[in-house]
Amino acid sequence: MHTFVDAIEFLFDNLGLIWDKTVEHLALSGAAVGVAMALAIPLGVWLGHLHRGSFIAINVSNVGRALPSLAVISIGLGLLGVGFLNVMVALVILAAPVMLTNAYVAVDQVDPDAVRAARGMGMRPLQTLVRVELPLALPLMFAGIRTAAVYVVATAPLAALAGGGGLGDIIVNQPTYGPAGVVAGSIAIAVLAFATEGVFALVQHLATPRGLRRRREEKLLEPRIDTAAA
């Protein structure tokens, strides 16, 4: 308990340090999430639109999740050296599979009746994708981005082991910052992860079409039948 109190005091006494390291942490995490989105979302959307490539999407996701980020960073040290780029690549490998799978499943499982109705109205495949499939797929797609973003923010402290900066620098430098600094850095990362979850949850809610939101709310308000009592 005494260490926790010291950690809180460390946070307030070193706000400048915490802020600088948080900015580094967010810059690294944001770059990784952005690159992962640019690579995974278009591929997942296109494969889902074609209703093909489930083998690719699922297996890429499984391989990406199985690779330990620390091992990827270690391998990258020999290829990319120490610094920002090495860690960012490792975090992209962590985030992209989740986004790819969710994007594929989101588009692939869009209500086929809606797609057929769009085609019956004369929409071309690209128009159907943009005007019908993507809006209906957005909630699940953003769920994948949200999960990946939290993964990245929580894993980014490993960047300190390869010169990538961020809040991990405080955790690994116990001789400099002491046990209170280590706990304070951990608290800051936990708060940042929760904040990331909250922000992306809000974005996911706003990205969900009103019709889907209304339908979801109606389902929640529907009276449930107690089968056991019946």
Image (spheres, rainbow, N blue to C red):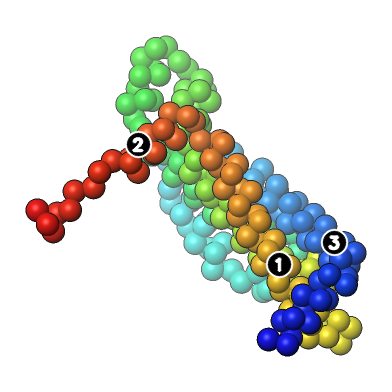
Quarter of the figure that contains the N terminus: bottom right
Residue at the spot of label 3: 19
Question: Does dot 3 land on a helix, a strand or a loop?
Answer: helix
Residue of label 2: 218
Q: Which mark is residue 143?
A: none
Q: What is the crowding at mark 1: few (fewer than 14 residues within 10 Å), some, or many (at least 20)?
A: many
Compared to residue 225, the image places residue 113 above or below, namely above
Q: Is residue 2 above or below residue 17?
A: below
Q: Which of disc 3 and disc 2 is earlier in sequence?
A: 3
Regarding mark 1 in the picture, which secondary structure is present there?
helix
**How dense is the environment of label 2, judged by Cα within 10 Å: few (below 14), some, or many (20 and up)?**
few
Q: Give how far apart the Cα atoms at labels 1 and 2 are.
A: 37 Å
**Residue 42: image location, x then y, percent:** 59, 39
Left or right placement of residue 9 versus residue 105 in this view: right
First of labels 1, 2 by sequence position: 1
Q: Residue furthest left?
A: 230
Q: Are marks 3 and 1 in contact (CB under 8 Å)?
A: no
Up/down of 156 relative to 131, above or below? below
Q: Amino acid at mark 3?
A: Trp
Residue 106 place in picture, x, y as percent: 45, 41
Report the front residue among 70 and 193.
193
Q: Amino acid at mark 1?
A: Ile
**Which labelled disc corresponds to residue 189?**
1
Mark before the other along the chain sequence, 3 or 1: 3
Residues at marks 1 and 2 touching, judged by CB atoms closer than 8 Å: no
In the displayed structure, 21 sits above or below 71; it is: above
Residue beneath the point at 68% across and 73% down: 70
